[in-house]
Amino acid sequence: DGGITQSPKYLFRKEGQNVTLSCEQNLNHDAMYWYRQDPGQGLRLIYYSQIVNDFQKGDIAEGYSVSREKKESFPLTVTSAQKNPTAFYLCASNTGTYGYTFGSGTRLTVV
Amino acid sequence: KQEVTQIPAALSVPEGENLVLNCSFTDSAIYNLQWFRQDPGKGLTSLLLIQSSQREQTSGRLNASLDKSSGRSTLYIAASQPGDSATYLCAVVEGSARQLTFGSGTQLTVLP
């Protein structure tokens, strides 16, 4: 079945540590996105990529970085510059005809 | 800046009732509108996608309508079941990046 795979499901980060969240899709979609979900604040866009080797900042990009070296993969790194990283992170891909498909999410907690 | 509002924020109904969830948006320059379902601790499951040129879409017991000119969409759920209990999110697709702008969701509880 086609879809988006996010890993790990749970991730714990120590203060000052960088961590990378994985997102892989086999839908052959060009566009991929990272969203952050916090209780009571809805989902907010972190970064997006519309084509390989190109990506753009979203509304809350500070403290995050991404890469898009392959069409299938769009990893998100949460750097030590992100002061409040505890949240639920969702990766998505989009095709105009069929809309958005989301992964199952990664829950990141600072310990 | 686009704002998406969902009313009510929470809803509790007995099993078997028909119900309507409301979504409004401030900028009508959208490509499409998508309704999602989210179970606790899970990702988003797409329910219905309405293209900007369409007025409604149906899937099983779900029917979504779109009135772009007034900035409104509704999600109608017929004969609700306890398994329908979840948070329902409305999102509009806009801009050159085709990005989603979400509402805060309606938390639905269907009581057996």
Image (cartoon, grey):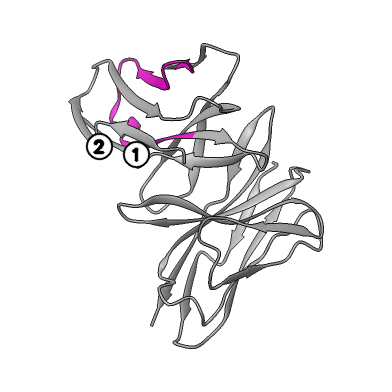
Q: Residues within 10 Å of mark 2 (few under 14, many from 20)?
A: some
Asked if one can make out residue B91 in the rendered structure from this viewpoint, the answer is yes
Q: Which mark is residue B105?
A: 1
Q: Nearer the viewer, residue B98 or A93?
A: B98
Answer yes or no: do the residues labelled 1 and 2 have beta carbons within 8 Å? Answer: yes
Q: Give the range drawn in magenta.
A: B66-91
| Identity, as a three-letter code, of the amino acid under mark 2 | Ala
Q: Which percent across, then down, holds residue A103? A: 57, 50
In the image as oriented, which residue stretches furthest toward the top? B55
Query: Of helix, strand and loop, which one carries label 2?
Result: loop
Label 2, on which residue? B9
Q: Does the magenta stretch include residue B100?
A: no
Q: Give the residue drawn at x 62%, y 33%.
A: A99
Q: Which percent across, then down, holds residue B60? A: 47, 16
Asked if one can make out residue B112 in the rendered structure from this viewpoint, the answer is no
Q: Give the residue drawn at x 47%, y 17%.
A: B66
Query: Of helix, strand and loop, which one carries label 1?
Result: loop
